[in-house]
Structure formats: C-alpha cells, structure tokens
C-alpha cells in the first residue's frame, strides 16, 4: 500500500538515474510526492527511473540538465515553476567520484569535482528557494559522505566539495529558517552502489573490517532517512549532518 504523507509535494532529485539518487526518487514517490528526476548524461537511466515510478503508481518527470551550468539550472527551475507552480523538496545528490593523488591532480580536475557537488548545490538552492517560498515551506537535503570526516587519500577534491556542501547547508539552515525551509546533509558511509570506471576502486579505508556493524549499507537506508527528514515529522531537524555508516565514524 502506497503512503500518502508526501501527497501534493513536488521533489527534485539530482543524479537520480542510479544508486542512491534513484532510490531516493523511488522512495519519495512511494510516499506520494511528484518527482523531477534529474541527470546530466545518463538519459536512459533517468527515464528508466521515471518509468519505474510510474509503474508503481507514482508521478514523475525526467529532466536532463547539467547542474553546474547556471543557465541549465535556470531552465529546469523555470520548467518546474511553470508546470507545478513551485517546489517543496530539493535533494542535491549529484556528484562525481574520482581518485587522483594530490600531486597528480590538475586544477581542471579539481574544479570539475567542485563544480558539481558544491557549485551545483549553490545554483540549485539559489533557484529553488524562491519556489519553496511560494509554497510556504521547503526542505533541502545535500548528500555528503564520510570521506572528508575520516581523511581519504586521493580524494581531496571530493572531500573539499562535500565539506563545503555541509557548510552551505548549516549556514542556510539559519538563514532560511524564517521561511520554514529546513536544510540538512546526510553523510553515507560505505554503501552498496555501482561504481563507474572513473570512480576507481573503493578507497582502502572503506571495507567491512572498519565497520562495527560488519556490513555495508543499502541505498534504501539512505532513501528512508531522506524521506524522514523531508516529511511531516522532519520539520524540527535542520542544520544537521546525519551520518549513516554502521558505526565506522562517530560524532
């Protein structure tokens, strides 16, 4: 039986063609939200997510856009406003995973990573907040990660982008509170996902031996937490980074 707790809510999930983003989109749709499924290059995967949502009785629309491009973000948000009148939920999940030693890293690669996870989150939030204000409230969730909390070699660009994302959400939690907009981050640990060729092998610091609960996490566990904090029982949670890592990093 489908839940109705998010009925009438409009949610944009970036990087939603696979892995954590796809699971979040499916989970929010199962609770009644209408989902805008965003991706940059993975059109087939994006529209497969849309089809899966619709097959399960939900409502979704795919929108291809490079979130590091201000004009592309503007067009996507204009489309959302025109079709739905506003936005209630933004999940900044899109990000690039690379592993390059610092001494071998070019400034071009550094900027490539930050342009998506950090600049993209800024551009999305900047464009989304006026639409949330129109709806009287909103919820923004950034998907961070464990890397910059534990120190992971060959991923300083990824770590910097996620640290910046967490700082952005903390600051906006205070600034946007008068508009009833909550801002949080979720920092997954080792999660069972499909890794692209450019992602390299999993960091050596990430293995079951370092996880007290002795297993890796599932994408559905991240999606369930997103659903909680954007739902009717999450309105008092803001400015937080919530770790989901089986005990491998404790705050």
Image (cartoon, helix red, strand yellow):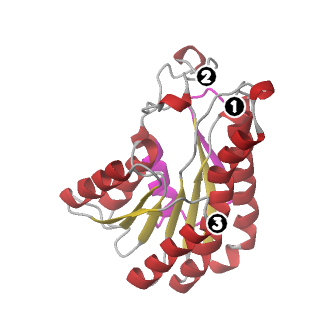
Q: Secondary structure at mark 2?
A: loop
Residue 149 x, y percent position in the rendering? 72, 35
Horizontally, residue 177 falls left or right of residue 53, namely right
Q: Residue at x 64, y 66 (%)?
A: 123
Horizontally, residue 84 falls left or right of residue 245, namely left
Residue 176 x, y percent position in the rendering? 69, 73
Q: Which mark is residue 19?
A: none
Residue 122 x, y percent position in the rendering? 67, 63
Question: Is mark 3 in CB contact (under 8 Å) with mark 2?
Answer: no
Horizontally, residue 46 falls left or right of residue 1, namely right
Q: Residue at x 63, y 50 (%)?
A: 117
Q: Residue at x 20, y 62 (%)?
A: 57
Q: Which residues are magenta?
A: 222-251
> Is 78 placed above or below 215 here?
below
Sooner in the amino-acid sequence: mark 3 or mark 2? 3
Where does label 3 land, which residue? 123
Where does label 2 land, which residue? 203
* Dot 2 alpha-carbon crowd within 10 angstroms: few under 14, some 14 to 19, many 20 or more: some
Q: Secondary structure at mark 3?
A: helix
Measured in 3D between alpha carbons, the distance from the residue under mark 1 to the one under mark 3, in whole angstroms, is 23 Å
> Is 104 placed above or below 37 here?
above
Where does label 1 land, which residue? 155
Q: Secondary structure at mark 1?
A: loop
- Of residues 165 and 187, the one nearer the viewer is 165
Question: Is mark 2 in CB contact (under 8 Å) with mark 1?
Answer: yes
Q: Name, please, the residue furthest toward the right.
A: 103
| Quadrant where the C terminus is found in the figure | top right
* Dot 1 alpha-carbon crowd within 10 angstroms: few under 14, some 14 to 19, many 20 or more: many
Sooner in the amino-acid sequence: mark 1 or mark 3? 3
């Amino acid at each position: 039986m489908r839940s109705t707790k998010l009925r009438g809510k409009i949610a944009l999930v970036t990087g939603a063609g696979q892995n954590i983003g796809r699971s979040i989109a499916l989970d929010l749709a199962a609770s009644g939200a209408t989902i805008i499924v965003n991706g940059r290059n993975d059109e087939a995967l994006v529209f497969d997510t849309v089809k899966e949502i619709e097959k399960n009785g939900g409502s979704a629309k795919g929108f291809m856009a490079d979130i590091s491009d201000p004009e592309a973000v503007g067009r996507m948000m204009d489309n959302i406003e025109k079709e739905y009148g506003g936005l209630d939920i933004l999940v900044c999940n899109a990000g690039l995973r690379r592993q390059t030693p610092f001494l071998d890293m070019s400034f071009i690669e550094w900027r490539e990573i930050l342009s998506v996870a950090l600049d993209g989150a800024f551009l999305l939030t900047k464009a989304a907040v006026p639409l949330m204000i129109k709806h009287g409230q909103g919820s923004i969730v950034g998907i961070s990660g464990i890397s910059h909390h534990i120190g992971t070699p060959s991923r300083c660009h990824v770590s910097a982008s996620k640290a910046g994302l967490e700082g952005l959400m903390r600051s906006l939690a205070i600034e946007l509170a008068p508009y009833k907009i909550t801002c949080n981050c979720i920092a997954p640990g080792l999660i069972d996902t499909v890794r692209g060729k450019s992602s390299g092998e999993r960091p050596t610091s990430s293995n079951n031996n370092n996880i007290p609960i002795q297993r890796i996490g599932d994408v559905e566990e991240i999606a369930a937490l997103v659903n909680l904090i954007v739902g009717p029982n999450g309105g008092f949670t803001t400015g937080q980074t919530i770790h989901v890592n089986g005990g491998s990093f404790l705050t």
